[in-house]
Amino acid sequence: MVTMQDVAERAGVTKQTVSNVISGRVAVRPATAARVRAAIEELGYTPNLVARSLATGSTKTVGLFVPTVAGAFYADVVEAVEDVLEEHGYHLLLCTTRLDGERARRHLAGLTSRSVDALLIAGDRDLIGHLPLLADARFPVALCAWESDAPGAFPVVTIDYEHAGFLAGRHLRDLGHERVAVLASPDHGPRLAGFRRAFAADGLAVPDRAVHTATEPTIAGGFAAANAAFAADPGLTAIFATHDILALGALEAARLTGRSVPSDLSIVGHDDNPEVRLARPALTSVAIPKREMARLAIELLLRAVAKSGTPVNSLQLLRPELVVRDSTCPPGTPTT
Amino acid sequence: MVTMQDVAERAGVTKQTVSNVISGRVAVRPATAARVRAAIEELGYTPNLVARSLATGSTKTVGLFVPTVAGAFYADVVEAVEDVLEEHGYHLLLCTTRLDGERARRHLAGLTSRSVDALLIAGDRDLIGHLPLLADARFPVALCAWESDAPGAFPVVTIDYEHAGFLAGRHLRDLGHERVAVLASPDHGPRLAGFRRAFAADGLAVPDRAVHTATEPTIAGGFAAANAAFAADPGLTAIFATHDILALGALEAARLTGRSVPSDLSIVGHDDNPEVRLARPALTSVAIPKREMARLAIELLLRAVAKSGTPVNSLQLLRPELVVRDSTCPPGTPTT
DNA sequence: CTGAAAGCGCTTACAG
DNA sequence: CTGAAAGCGCTTACAG
């Protein structure tokens, strides 16, 4: 492999000079610089980034942990992160934890060895217990897409999930719904709380018996939870699913129990994933600014890297937005 | 930061000995090893991987290029790659090219600087023109999920796409279809060729006017192409879409033109993405072993890294499988 | 504007 | 089984 030394010899200078023309940090006489550049060209020299990293202490790489890359949410997060990184000349080291805490721990331990300039952890559940491992990490760490229990030790950029739930509830209340059910994933406490707040504002309660926990975040999980909701209250007029995929299952359950959506049953989803636009009817859903979230989190990190300090430890909540489509209407609206 | 030297001093040995107990390459007297381990523990020492990489020439990292991470196909590829890497103690450097050749080129150039032990490139279109950049890469390179024009310079592990098309065609022929159309993405030549081969085997031709190119790989693209197909031959009884997403668009087009699927129109998709199971009717599709493909490609690469040689330059084609669901039946079958 | 020196933290033969 | 030496390829002050 051709090294900086080789280039230097060829150009008749020392390697420091070569380094200077490459980095541009120190002025080099144009004629010399030209000779060096020619030598680089002729030799096909390309700097050894590992050596550079050892000397500078920076790898120009940031780590990203996500639970998975399947599904629009995290796929978008990954791509948004990559875009920002690219703008700043950084590379992406990706680790999908797959809801496997032990796996996550191993990777975390691996990263600790200063092979990364910063670390962004998106999504909770898996890593929460291992975060203390990061307590004395040599690089800045931030969290995003964290719904609850965000440990105070790190800055977090996330969605105002409580507000998301509130928007869903508010929409159903505006339409006049009173007998409603929630299909909730276990980790979606804030969304549920926000939903309840919307009803409470009108003096209405969403009792625990109207909340049905989905055992898994799948169509089947939503299907089962929706059927449980129908059994608990056959006369309910609306459902809020804390995740689009559950809403899709609810749609299926409605079809099989002869409920037409939205005239017999309104359904509101959450996340506004692309597939909800394909559902029949197209689902009303709460859209969350995931790309902006990812961007802000990475920029925060990169800023900390640049001034080699700790990032400002704050909790930043991005506001979601309701997207009304065809799956919601006032209760008792005749089928068209 | 605590270094190997610090550990050595604390344990009263030299850093070479510390290195030996960590690597386990050289036997160390148990008592000494214990002292060293204690020192590591007390100091919270963790080796600097960058320094190790510079000394060994290996970064324990492999690069993966994919066009995108959105969509089940590449998401699965990424996760499969990661699983294999994890088994071997490697990290994943991810780059999504986003169909942006210039972006891909930049990343490629970046990787060339020996910061990666191997490189897997999944999917074509974007990188094809820049592959020569890799001609004298210092690490092994392999290609996967390559449909056509795989440059002979690198080993490729991919799907037998021609066979995939054949399976689709064969299925429709077995059902008795004769007047068919193909909705094809521009890059899916082999699938189309295979489809035609199945018809040719029965002495039937699939003329060019029955092939409708989708301008984009989206529902809308499939929708438009399907309508073009209906216009060209109102009496066609079956459609093969070279991509599931196009098939979904065709489903929509069938609905809006009053064709019932499958009794009036059979539809076969390709890729067997999870969403086709949710479509109504559930789509018949050609399933491709993408995870196996990714695994084989990475293992090939890792083998080459292990013996620091060039990988065997071969073209390996994995066989797809037809998954029959509810969107296909013999032509003229009465609606149930 | 250019060169001599030291160092980043590790590993790898090679002596003892 | 342990230590002394050299080296991986770069960068960073610091002289001249």
Image (spheres, coloured by chain):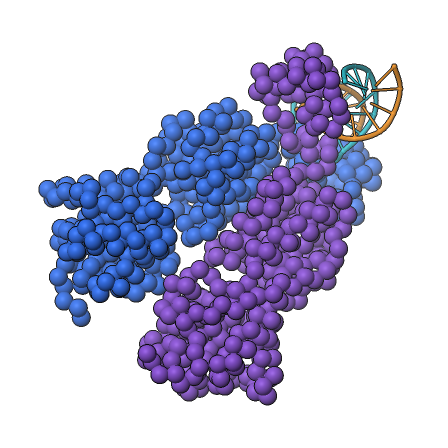
Chain colours: A purple, B blue, C cyan, D orange
Apparent side of residue C7 relative to residue A51 in the rendered image (left or right)? right
Count the marks: 0
Q: Quadrant of residue A47?
A: top right
> In the image, residue B240 lies at what x, y percent?
24, 51
Residue at x-position 73% and y-position 31%: A55
Apparent side of residue B56 relative to residue B75 in the rendered image (left or right)? right
> In the image, residue B36 lies at what x, y percent?
76, 41
Residue at x-position 23% and y-position 45%: B211
Extreme-left residue of the structure: B203
**Which quadrant does the C terminus of chain B fall into?**
bottom left
Residue at x-position 74% and y-position 52%: A311
> In the image, residue B38 lies at what x, y percent?
77, 46
**Which quadrant does the N terminus of chain B fall into?**
top right
Apparent side of residue A203 relative to residue B181 in the rendered image (left or right)? right
Is A208 situated above or below B124?
below
Using the rendered image of the protein, determine whether residue B232 is visible from the camera's viewpoint: yes
Q: In terms of depth relative to the viewer, which is nearer, A280 or B118? A: A280
Q: Quadrant of residue C13?
A: top right
Using the rendered image of the protein, determine whether residue B168 is visible from the camera's viewpoint: no
Is B8 situated above or below C16?
below
Residue at x-position 76% and y-position 44%: A307
> In the image, residue A335 lies at what x, y percent?
33, 80
Q: In terms of depth relative to the viewer, which is nearer, B140 or D5? A: B140
Q: In terms of depth relative to the viewer, which is nearer, A85 or B87? A: A85
Is A92 situated above or below C9?
below
